[in-house]
Amino acid sequence: MTPNIIELAKEMRSIFELAREECVALFVGSFRFPNRGCEGACRYFAHRVMTQYPECRVCVVEGYDRRGDERHFWVLVDDRVYDLTCDRFEGVSAPILGERDTPLSQRFTELRFIEGKAIFDNWNPGERFQKARVLRYINYKSAQPHLYLVKC
């Protein structure tokens, strides 16, 4: 299953990069993806995994760095880490896709695990960002693989 999830993660990252280039607002911080927008990217990626692979255990992790007063999000799928925005941090050169651990867990030590409906259905991204519209954009771009290049 991991290779399928890795490919989906690469596809989602490419779609988010394309949206940034096209100036399409998908979620808070999407205009500066991957330097911002980790929560939205994680929640949409987790939603796609849960939809396409309902047998997988999916969890969004919110990490907090008290010293730097900063939050970061990543996704666990069957206990494997998928972090589409971690390369914004010093010392990390590429997204983490399907690894057992993340070096960022050393920095973001206070963890909150978001599961089930709280990942997407009960999440409110703000009035400006309509989940149904964003999902239509993602599904359209996903169905048009020739429109983007996988860069990961």
Image (spheres, helix red, strand yellow):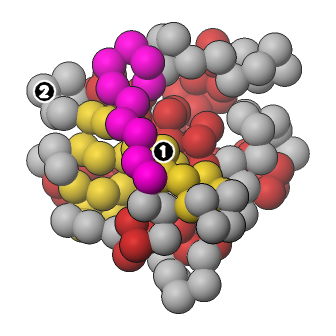
Residue 30 pos. (x, y %): 75, 46
Q: Image check: 31 left or right of 146?
A: right
Query: Which residue corresponds to mark 1?
Result: 62
Q: Nearer the viewer, residue 63 or 38?
A: 63
Residue 80 x, y percent position in the rendering: 22, 55
Q: Quickly name the residue at label 2.
A: 55
Q: Given the image, on which type of amino acid does mark 1 rest?
A: Glu
Q: Secondary structure at mark 2?
A: loop
Q: Amino acid at mark 2?
A: Glu
Q: Nearer the viewer, residue 47 or 38?
A: 38
Check residue 91 in the rendering and tell me which mark sits there, or answer none: none
Q: Is residue 50 visible?
A: yes
The quadrant holding residue 53 is: top left
In percent of width and height, residue 29 lies at 77, 46
Residue shown at the point (60%, 59%) measured from the top left: 66
Residue at the location (41% across, 48% down)? 111
The magenta span reads 110-119
